[in-house]
């Protein structure tokens, strides 16, 4: 099996939207329902809903990597970053880092993506980790894989590009990402499509 980065037209993703109109309509309908519910909340409740959403996203993102963080620490850090709380109660640098990432992404999502921005986000989420040099591309020789299963019987779901070509491949991806943004040279207009690609 070849992975996305091994395809000859990477990262110029191709997709067929025929037959997806019903999904787009359902998505738009559900998005409208949620937007209506949120607008019906008081300003304070709207902010708290955003904080809860960011905390949930932070905790799920961390769980993918096997990091189990305190919801209280993440919530406190997000509230501090948004100016809702004066003093964060979090003592866990990992919770503070992922909370900082969540608030930064919410404030800078429309800006063009860059290597520097990715490195800064990496430094945020790697706060408190001693074995990793954050803010740079990986350099190890062994393959980076997404695996599951017991030791000796692992299933490889994905193998990332070798470290030696990561800078080049990330430059290509960043160009594609910026070009397909709403203000890019070849925009993907439907947010649901762009996020899926």
Image (spheres, rainbow, N blue to C red):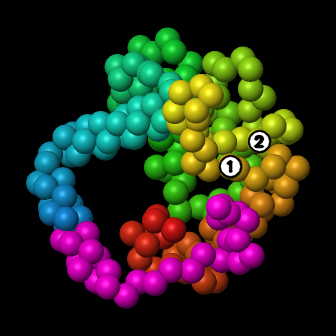
Q: Which label was assigned to residue 102?
A: none
Tag 1 near tag 2, CB within 8 Å: yes
Occupied quadrant, residue 58: top left
Name the residue rendered at 39%, 40% in the picture.
Answer: 57
**Is label 2 in a helix, a strand or a loop?**
loop
Name the residue rendered at 49%, 11% in the picture.
Answer: 91
Asked if residue 25 is among those painted magenta in the image, a careful observer would answer yes
Occupied quadrant, residue 173: bottom right
Q: Earlier in the sequence, mark 1 or mark 2?
A: 2
Residue at mark 1 to residue at mark 2: CA–CA distance: 7 Å
Q: Give the mark count.
A: 2
Position of 12 with respect to 143 (left or right) is: left
Q: Residue furthest bottom?
A: 18
Q: Is residue 191 above or below residue 105?
A: below
Position of 43 with respect to 156 (left or right) is: left
Occupied quadrant, residue 20: bottom left
Q: Which x, y percent locates residue 21?
A: 28, 83
Asked if residue 27 is among those painted magenta in the image, a careful observer would answer yes
Report the front residue among 133 and 156: 156
Report the front residue among 25 and 146: 146
Report the front residue among 85 and 101: 101
Residue stretch rendered in magenta on the structure: 1-29
Q: Which x, y percent locates residue 135?
A: 75, 38
């Amino acid at each position: 099996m070849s992975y996305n980065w091994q395809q000859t037209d990477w990262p110029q993703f191709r997709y067929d939207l025929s037959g997806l109109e019903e999904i787009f309509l359902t998505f738009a309908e559900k998005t409208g329902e949620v937007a209506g519910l949120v607008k019906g909340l008081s300003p304070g409740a709207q902010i708290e809903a955003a904080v809860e959403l960011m905390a949930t996203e932070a905790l799920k993102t961390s769980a993918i990597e096997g990091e189990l963080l305190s919801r209280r620490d993440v919530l406190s850090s997000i509230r501090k970053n948004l100016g809702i709380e004066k003093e964060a109660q979090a003592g866990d640098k990992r919770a503070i880092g992922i909370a900082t990432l969540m608030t930064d992404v919410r404030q800078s999502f429309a800006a063009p993506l860059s290597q520097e921005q990715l490195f800064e986000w990496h430094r945020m989420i790697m706060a408190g980790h001693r074995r990793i040099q954050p803010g740079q591309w990986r350099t190890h020789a062994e393959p980076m894989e997404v695996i599951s299963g017991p030791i000796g019987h692992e299933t490889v779901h994905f193998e990332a590009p070798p470290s030696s070509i990561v800078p080049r491949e990330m430059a290509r991806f960043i160009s594609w990402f910026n070009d397909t943004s709403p203000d890019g040279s070849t925009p993907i207009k439907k947010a649901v499509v762009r996020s899926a690609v």
